Amino acid sequence: MAGNVEIGPAGRPFEMPVVFGDASAETTPRVIDRGAVVLAFLLLAAMALAAGLFVATGRPAAALAAAAVLPVLAILVRYPFAAVLLWVVALPFFIQVDTVTPHPAFWVLHRLMIPAVLGLVLVYHGLGQMRTRLRPSIVDAAILTFIGLGVANILLLSDNSVRMLIAFYDRLGVPILVFWLIRAIDPGQRDIQRLAGAGAITVAVQAAIGILAWVSPGVLPSAWLGRAEERTVGTFGGPGPFTVTLVFFGLLAAHYALAGTGRRPRALLLATVAAGLFAIFLSFQRGGWLGAAVGFAGLWLVHRRATSRMAIAGVVVAIVLALGPLATEFSFASERLGDDATVQSRLITFDAAIQMVEAEPLRGFGYGQFEKFDEQFKRTVGDVAFEEGGSLHNSWLGLAAENGIPAVLLYVFPFAYLFVRSLRLTNRLTKRKFLGGALLIVLWAGIFDIVLVSNTMDMLHSSPWGTALAWIALALIAVQIDQVPPDVSVVRSRIMAGFRLPSAADDAPPR
């Protein structure tokens, strides 16, 4: 699937607007009619199934979920990228999972759908019915080696290898499968714009849930109220995954809006981004605030004038709120910025992690085994007295302590490799307004946010969501890089030459 044209199971080009209602003049009437008839039939069958299940069980939610399987499968077969869109919109509601007895929706959306659709795309490619740019590379070799070492580590060192294998698959395996799925699909501009729209929906919903947890917690399920009136965490249970979600999809939505769209969609997208930023403030997570600042600094590099205006407006609004209805919240935020007690308490655990790495630098102590061994290495650090308990708030130290330094290097290698390639090729990629170098900068800004937050929280263990966002961004970066013709000579990056960004003249095709 290259560009804006997808290749259907029958080998003919088709446009997904048949499903989403965005008719295209290039789509033949025969394909439109056939797709409309099939979808109409499936929808009618789904409605009949839902009615029957409701009558038989009396449970409308279960009936609707079961009935939705048919049309969803039809869309996924016809348009595999819909799996990523569905995953982005639906999974956050089921992300707080117990790896032993997870919600059935987590099984379907996370554990089954992503590998199944990846397998479907690869089968299509093998049958010659779909084109894909996915080719084995040094990046994939590093990833496969990381997975192999991780599995061996668990089998040899973990107390409960089955449970740890499941956790490893959920937290790291599926995010990597999403990376491969997006590369195999090779999404074009329209697909990435749809992802930005789906992400904007997620931002709006999560921001609304986070704000409701403060002003009207009684309307929300108890599972989403673990940090009520303390932190804004949405449905994720923790501020780390919550803030990186709002930053990453907020960046995509803002870039989509500012790169050129209608006035009303632009206003709606930017209003959604503003709501997300307000919810990030209410998370009261300093790492999230810093990550958001770095992320939107990347957006400023692409859209300087518009971002500067929004920043000025945001500062004015913040001053008004700080002097009025949110004076208490802003006072607490100021206290958070000046409070170093939590930082000092983490020094003990950081020091223990470093000692664990020094003790077992190659193999580590076993995936998921940090809290089993960390107490043995804790000690007084400077003026910070030793104290028991506490968890590690650093993803990279945790990975090194549990899996060893080689695992960290293998995990980081794909990001480092593609970052270097991005720097070398951005000059060529900045020929397009939404895609290319502009999108590349926005995506790397989102990854930098996730990296920063991962230094203040153990994102690799707490939730598969934030990890998956980083791999989604990396996949989109790889797609942009792979679209550069191989015979193009490498020239000095515009990033390194003063961040000269696309202008109207850049949209003209190169000579």
Image: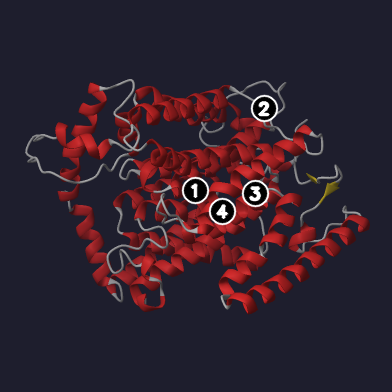
Which amino acid is tagged 1? Trp
Query: Which residue was labeled with disc 2?
Result: 135
How much space separates mark 2 and mark 3, taking CA atoms? 21 Å
Which is more toward the observer, 479 or 35?
35
Nearest-to-viewer mark from 4 and 1? 4
How much space separates mark 1 and mark 2, taking CA atoms? 34 Å
Dot placed on the residue nearer the N-terminal end, 2 or 3: 2
Which is more toward the observer, 94 or 333?
94
Residue 12 as seen in the image, left or right of residue 101 = right
Residue 9 vs 96, above or below: the answer is: above
Which amino acid is tagged 3? Ile
Query: Which residue was labeled with disc 1?
Result: 300
| Quadrant housing residue 410 | top left
**Callout 2 environment at 10 Å: few (<14), some (14 to 19), or many (20+)?**
few
Dot placed on the residue nearer the N-terminal end, 4 or 1: 4
**Callout 4 environment at 10 Å: few (<14), some (14 to 19), or many (20+)?**
some
How much space separates mark 3 and mark 4, taking CA atoms? 20 Å
| Secondary structure under the numbered disc 3 in the rendered image | helix
Query: Which residue was labeled with disc 4?
Result: 109
Which is more toward the observer, 200 or 69?
69
Query: Which residue was labeled with disc 3?
Result: 192
Which amino acid is tagged 4? Leu
| Secondary structure under the numbered disc 1 in the rendered image | helix
Residue 164 as seen in the image, left or right of residue 346 = right
**Callout 1 environment at 10 Å: few (<14), some (14 to 19), or many (20+)?**
some
**Callout 3 environment at 10 Å: few (<14), some (14 to 19), or many (20+)?**
some
